[in-house]
Amino acid sequence: MASQALFVGNMKGGVGKSTLACYLYDFLRLKARQHTINLVDADGQGSAYEMLAPIAPPGTTRHMTLGDRYDGVNMLTADTFLRSRLAEDKNLVIIDSGAGRPDSIAQVAMMCSCVLVPTSLSWADLRPTRDFIIELQERKDSSRAVQPHIIVVPNRVPPQQRDLTQLTETLANLDVIVAPGLSEISAVRRQSSHFGGLAAVHNTRFYDEFLQLGEFIRNFVLSGKLDKIYADSSNVVELNNLRSVR
């Protein structure tokens, strides 16, 4: 079974990158037991690494600060680590990146199956999110690459909100997939001092929403279905449905 890497990124801080990475790690640890799940925390703050400490098996999480502001040796170490994991079978690697422009860390993103881009619906988040996606898309276009698939994850969307025009307009003309969104985060905030994973938020809206998001990633990314949809020109309708805001 082929190995894959999932990159969680956005140049905007505070959009939920570490939260998404940590819960995705726990979801895959429980739902994809045939794989070995690893997480690389590339953010200087190390939030994801610290959050996962109570539940992560030894050796499955690493803190490697990456980016143009840091030692290039770290980038070489991360590149070597990722290539070694992808060369083996049954590995899933999640990379939680820090805020800021992609720059050199984009070379790591380009080795991944997908880039998950969380964002709220506020213009303060949407504008840098669009800039981040455009930069990644330009790198993909220049290398004529299909991967990484760019998947936007709407975050902090109030359940009663029906008008998603701003998100739709922001993503217009971008080659992105829109994943099921997340709204309820109050249960997550209560875990800030001691992360308990999905089990600790059972029977909450966030739990139900994250299971839907996790299954979306399993069904479309990990299965290779998204690659097949892009490869088959007859799947235009299905592809357009995946680009629609949920």
Image: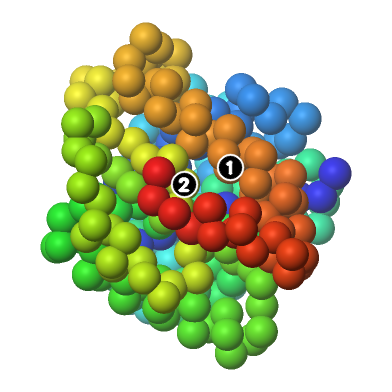
Question: In the image, is residue 148 above or below residue 218?
Answer: below
Q: How many marks?
A: 2
Residue 108 in percent (x, y) is at: 56, 68
The residue depicted at 29 percent of the width and 53 percent of the height is 119
Q: Residues within 10 Å of mark 2 (few under 14, many from 20)?
A: many
- Among the two numbered marks 1 and 2 on one chain, the one whose residue lies closer to the N terminus: 2
Residue 222 in percent (x, y) is at: 69, 45
The residue depicted at 34 percent of the width and 36 percent of the height is 182
Q: Residues within 10 Å of mark 1 (few under 14, many from 20)?
A: many
Tell me the amino acid under the disc marked 1. Ile
Residue 130 in percent (x, y) is at: 32, 71
Q: Secondary structure at mark 1?
A: helix
Position of 170 with respect to 177 (left or right) is left
Instruction: Name the mark on residue 179.
Output: 2
| Residue 111 seen in the figure | no
Of circles 1 and 2, which is in front? 2
Does the CB distance between marks 1 and 2 fall below 8 Å?
A: yes
Tell me the amino acid under the disc marked 2. Ala
Circle 1 residue: 217
Question: In the image, is residue 120 above or below residue 148?
Answer: above
Instruction: Name the mark on residue 164.
Output: none
| Quadrant housing the C terminus | top left
| Quadrant housing the N terminus | top right
The colour scheme used here is rainbow
Gap between marks 1 and 2 measured at Cα: 8 Å
Kindly give the residue lying farthest to the top in the view shown.
203
The residue depicted at 57 percent of the width and 39 percent of the height is 216
Picture quadrant where residue 101 is located: bottom left
The residue depicted at 77 percent of the width and 30 percent of the height is 34
Residue 7 in percent (x, y) is at: 52, 56
